[in-house]
Amino acid sequence: MTKADARLFESGAVSLDSAGRAPAPMALQKDAPKSRIRRRNEAKILDAAQDVFAERGFAGASVDEIAARAGMSKPNLHYYYRRKKDVYQAVLLRILTIWLDPLEELNPAADPQSELRRYIHLKLDASRRHPTASRVFATEIIQGAPILQDYLAGPLRRLVARKADVINAWIAQGKLRPIDPYHLIFTIWAATQHYADFAPQVRAVLGIDDVSEGVFDRAEESLCGLLFDGLTPRTSEPGD
Amino acid sequence: MTKADARLFESGAVSLDSAGRAPAPMALQKDAPKSRIRRRNEAKILDAAQDVFAERGFAGASVDEIAARAGMSKPNLHYYYRRKKDVYQAVLLRILTIWLDPLEELNPAADPQSELRRYIHLKLDASRRHPTASRVFATEIIQGAPILQDYLAGPLRRLVARKADVINAWIAQGKLRPIDPYHLIFTIWAATQHYADFAPQVRAVLGIDDVSEGVFDRAEESLCGLLFDGLTPRTSEPGD
DNA sequence: GTCATTGTTGATCAATTGGTCAAGTTTTGT
DNA sequence: ACAAAACTTGACCAATTGATCAACAATGAC
């Protein structure tokens, strides 16, 4: 990472909307009717960039490698995204929708057990289907969320607050044991993302070559059993 | 990250023992009676390096910055550690003991409830006291565990297998509900490390300025309540 | 004290990096 | 067909990087 990169990051408060897309039609960027070629190439760049950022982090990812994996030259990549940081922001922006959507769907009117089970399923499915997206997101947060801090403190915080209310309502109705809804959500996030982010550790500990479907199925079964029924046996009274 | 760095990493199988410490007495490296100065400077380097690696990852960490934070010149740092990779390995090696120890202590003869509770407390305490260590470890795993893969597949896998046996024995004795011990351990790992690794997200969602003691206390209480007693209320029969 | 060992650093190097530019080629609207 | 817009790239640049080296300073055993 160059000193300049570091400075850009420290300055915080980077708008995710003002995508640093390069030239563009220059005159008409409001509606921006993106050409077919542009759409295809931006997608190829973001796909390649997501892989490289996941493997090496922002600083370790080189524009050259991203361009190569996207099948184009470096200057051509810079034609679509002026700076490496712009590519990174675009990748993160794309990831956010994948990450946000499942929680959004938690329905207060439905049965909490099936709603939470569905949420856990969706999050595990996201980890299974988008492991590199999960890793890019995780690395961004671990390194202080220089780009996403506004998103975390704004939209995400409000969303979680709303869903915490839903969980608290379920508790008030006697449908759930009283627990802190925030820490419940943290636990679900952590446990589900673990299978994408820490895949090498999961593989090594389980002694398998890849985290296949079966592992995710068992993970879902175990996690749901754990969260809903707990570890304490039902038929035993607490001894001494 | 330079191409050379990438190659070193890809070659895998890096012994953590053969610490790439620089010159050393040259003649007598077997017992290596490390001078006071050497011990003090190596510690300063590893402390500084752990912070920088946690903030920027391996590739983003510059030797210059590590040296500056350690209060010495870059050539002086290289006197103690020949290559950046050697510093990184030494940092990881130091972290491993912090990470390994708590699980080691799980005592099969004792009550599973109190043993698991103690384990969760120790892991949360490690996250609270060594957040940067947690982040360096997490980033290493997320990026494919290039250095730690042998440790994960060897010592860690064996340790977890032993402790899974302990948990299975508890289950066989009817002291725990039947769950997959591996996924239980994964869940505990994920949930406890979350408060160190994803601290910016936790802070933002909770709307607080730092993850203080109180948060860890509530996290421990919530997590233990969740894992032991689950979400399902005890006094309600499962309706349709 | 003395001198070999250990510790320290400014100056420097080669490699890689993010990013630019001018000069091209292709696509598109008409 | 043809011009304007969109797209593409080899060559290049300045900055930063990890690492080395020769020269110098401090330490410690005797």
Image: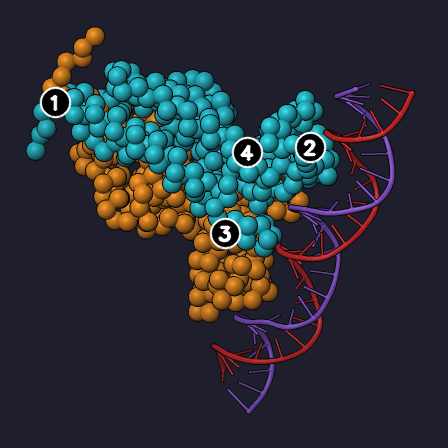
Chain colours: A cyan, B orange, C purple, D red
CA separation in Å, label 1 and label 3: 55 Å
Earlier sequence position, callout 1 versus callout 4:
4
* Residue on which disc 4 sits: A91
**Mark 2 element type:** loop
* Residue A165 to residue B81: above or below: above
CA separation in Å, label 3 and label 4: 19 Å
Residue B99: image location, x then y, percent: 37, 44
The amino acid type found where label 1 is placed reads Ser
Residue A72: image location, x then y, percent: 72, 32
**Mark 4 element type:** helix
Write down the chain letter for disc 4: A
Tell me the residue at 61%/42% (across/down).
A84
Earlier sequence position, callout 4 versus callout 2:
2
- Closest to the camera, between mark 3 and mark 2, is 2
Q: Residue furthest left?
A: A240
**Mark 3 element type:** helix
Label of residue A236 in the image: 1
Instruction: Look at the numbered discs 4 and 2 and tell me whether their residues touch, using CB distance below 8 Å.
Output: no
